[in-house]
Image (tube, rainbow, N blue to C red):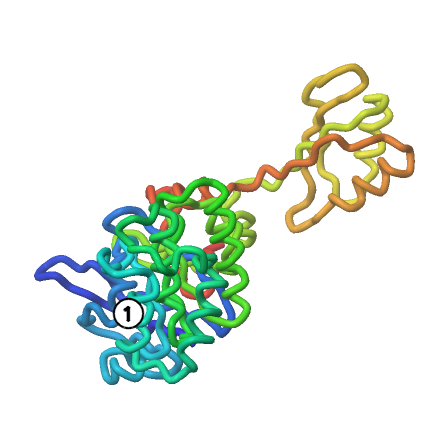
């Protein structure tokens, strides 16, 4: 649905985007991350046709955005960080204007009714946009991106400025939209990306440095794959049970957490997943597991590791191992 091939963008002597390639399949939500100045906004502007590239291709549903921008843009709904709103219009007037601008062929009333219900702005359709809260303006911006039912949605910081309840509602909506649309989501809220996205692309200094799921990136970039558990039961007996698990390399007793509750650090053979066996052995003795936590990296740690020089590589088909 979206294909970026060897994309480059130069500003004089500065190369903002340096030969990057990635794709997003139909009904996939792709997280697009990068620090300030990484080339993220430039790439998104090329994908939406706002900027031309210096080299490479950007295909939307098989159509090159540079070769045939009108056809490609019909399949794109774009929500920039600052929604493109006309503040003196009412919500209805604005959405009607966008409908006409996009030359939408869908039945106008039912189509706009459906969009307004989807983003929950039905109750403010008669109000002037200038008088709406930040949260409602963001929803109106998302509504305009949905006019025409485009196959591709490109969302730049869609929850910026929203309160916690609104953020959860917009995240839920994005996940629903991902069932019928290809979505590229750019956000500085990494927990949001992890909660919503199927796959993550990270760029830094104009180069692609990661293209994989958060789980695979965490596994591949972690120096070790230890498991920390807190178990209620006789410490020595629990340790003996854990030591007997196949593929277990080492069981280290960390500390006593509270009466009859001990924390252990488990180190298994590389590639082994011992979680289910730990659960089965403790359940058989009725020893409750009060905590089980992997030592693998969080998305925040992955992002820092990829963009601060500790790990760097041009990764086209998954994380570097």
- Is residue 222 visible to the viewer in this orientation of the structure? yes
How many numbered circles does the render carry? 1
Residue 254 place in picture, x, y as percent: 68, 22
Look at the picture and state if 104 lies above or below 304. below
Whether residue 200 is visible here, answered yes or no, is no
Residue pictured at 49% horizontal, 54% vertical: 321
Q: Work out whether residue 73 or residue 94 is closer to the camera in this orientation and state it.
A: 94
Q: Is residue 315 above or below residue 71?
A: above
Q: Position of residue 20 (x, y in %)?
A: 31, 65
Does residue 240 sit above or below 283 in this rendering? above
Residue at image position (38%, 51%) is 136
Residue hosting label 1: 48
Q: Is residue 129 left or right of residue 181?
A: left
| Label 1 secondary element | loop
Q: Position of residue 115 (x, y in %)?
A: 45, 67
The N terminus appears in which quarter of the rendering?
Answer: bottom left
> Would you place residue 86 above or below residue 56 in this image?
above
Q: Horizontal placement of 290 versus 148: left or right?
A: right
Residue nearer the viewer, 111 or 219: 111
Q: Position of residue 176 (x, y in %)?
A: 54, 63
Dot 1 crowding, Cα within 10 Å, few <14, some 14–19, many 20+: many
Residue lying furthest right: 285
User: Measuring 47% from the left and 48% from the top, which residue is drawn there?
Assistant: 192
Residue plotted at (19% across, 68% down): 51
Q: Residue extending furthest top?
A: 259
In the picture provided, is 40 more to the left or to the right than 123?
left
* View extreme (front): residue: 126
Dividing the picture into quadrants, the one containing residue 101 is bottom left
């Amino acid at each position: 649905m979206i294909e970026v091939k060897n994309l480059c963008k130069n500003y004089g002597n500065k190369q903002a985007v340096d030969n990057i390639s990635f794709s997003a399949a139909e009904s996939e939500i792709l997280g697009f991350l990068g620090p300030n100045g990484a080339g993220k906004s430039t790439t998104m502007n090329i994908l939406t046709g706002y900027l031309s590239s210096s080299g490479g291709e950007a295909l939307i549903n098989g159509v090159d955005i540079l070769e045939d921008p009108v056809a490609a843009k019909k399949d794109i709904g774009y929500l920039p960080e600052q929604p493109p709103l006309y503040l003196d219009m009412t919500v209805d007037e604005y959405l009607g204007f966008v409908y006409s601008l996009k030359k939408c062929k869908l039945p106008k009333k039912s189509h706009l009714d459906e969009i307004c219900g989807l983003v929950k702005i039905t109750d403010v359709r008669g109000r002037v946009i200038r008088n709406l809260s930040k949260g409602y303006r963001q929803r109106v911006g998302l509504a305009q991106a949905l006019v025409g039912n485009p196959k591709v949605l490109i969302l730049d910081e869609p929850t910026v400025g929203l309160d916690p309840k609104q953020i959860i509602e917009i995240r839920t909506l994005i996940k629903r939209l991902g069932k019928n649309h290809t979505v590229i989501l750019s956000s500085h809220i990494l927990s949001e990306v992890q909660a919503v996205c199927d796959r993550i692309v990270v760029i830094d200094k104009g180069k692609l440095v990661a293209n994989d799921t958060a789980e695979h990136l965490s596994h591949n970039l972690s120096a070790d794959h230890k498991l920390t558990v807190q178990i209620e039961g006789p410490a020595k007996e629990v340790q003996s049970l854990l030591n007997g698990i196949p593929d277990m390399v080492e069981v280290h007793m960390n500390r006593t957490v509270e009466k009859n509750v001990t924390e252990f650090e488990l180190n298994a053979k590389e590639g082994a997943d011992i979680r289910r066996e730990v659960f089965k052995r403790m359940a058989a003795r009725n020893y409750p597991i009060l905590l089980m936590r992997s030592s693998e990296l969080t998305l925040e740690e992955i992002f820092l590791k990829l963009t601060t020089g500790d790990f760097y590589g041009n990764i086209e088909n998954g994380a570097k191992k």
